[in-house]
Image (cartoon, grey):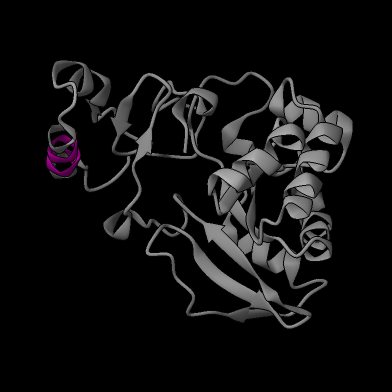
Amino acid sequence: GSQLDRLAAPLFKAGVTRLNISLDSLDPQRFRELTRTGDLHKVIAGIDAANAAGFVHTKLNCVVMHGRNDHEINDLLAFAIDRNLDVSFIEEMPLGIISEHSRAESFYSSDQVRERIAERYTLIPSTDSTQGPSRYWRLAEAPGIRIGFISPHSHNFCGTCNRVRLTVEGRLLLCLGNEHSVDLKAVLRANPGQPQKLEKAIIDAMQLKPWSHNFTHDDGVQVVRFMNMTGG
């Protein structure tokens, strides 16, 4: 969301209809610590710019960590309600190398997040589905927004996962928790002007999608991967 203040309007004009924005804290200092470089004010300005541009399908993604931002869960939810945004609360995944905290100690499950939300709001189970990893609930106090829970540890969703990611290097990544991938950039370069070759490579790649990740919530790094290069 850090570039949305200047890009929201042109993105909307270009036909983009949905946005996912990472927002793990509403405290500027904590936000900078969690993101290492992030400017909270720029992200909030970007969110407001997206609303002003006409986006109506905007979702906040919040990775919840015990002792770091779990006390902000309901404040983040109130922020989402105020701006009519959906929000997904995500269990931390062992991606990349960290030194700021212990993953074993910071693990905070989706069940714990719901317990925290229930201290202020009334959660209602929902049948909403995007055929992806999120499990959705609604709020009696704000029925217009969806609350998603992505639970790779406590409620493994691998058997129904339909997500792949295109990295900044042009690799089609088939699972965040594995190294299975296909180099689509190489396919494009080898077959210029032949989009059917690219389509076939993508379809064939689905056969490589693994059954499950190998995540645990101890301190070990399962995959050395950084989300700012992985893409969505």
* Residue at the spot 54% in from the left edge and 48% down from the top edge: 16
Figure disc tally:
0
As drawn, 63 above or below 231: below
* One can see residue 74 in this view: yes
Residue 32, above or below 22: above
- Residue nearest the observer in this picture, 35 or 143: 143
Q: Quadrant of residue 130?
A: bottom left
Q: Quadrant of the N terminus?
A: top right
Q: Quadrant of residue 186?
A: top left
| Of 8 and 155, the residue lying toward us | 8
Q: Is residue 132 left or right of residue 181?
A: right
Q: Residue at x 78, y 75 (%)?
A: 121
Q: Position of residue 109 (x, y in %)?
A: 58, 54
Q: Where residue 10 sits in the image (x, y, percent)?
A: 64, 39
Q: Which residues are magenta?
A: 198-205
Where residue 162 appears, as percent x and y from the top left, is 31, 54
Residue at 49 percent across and 55 percent down: it is 151
Image side of residue 105 versus residue 80, left or right: left
Asked whether residue 200 is drawn in magenta, I would say yes
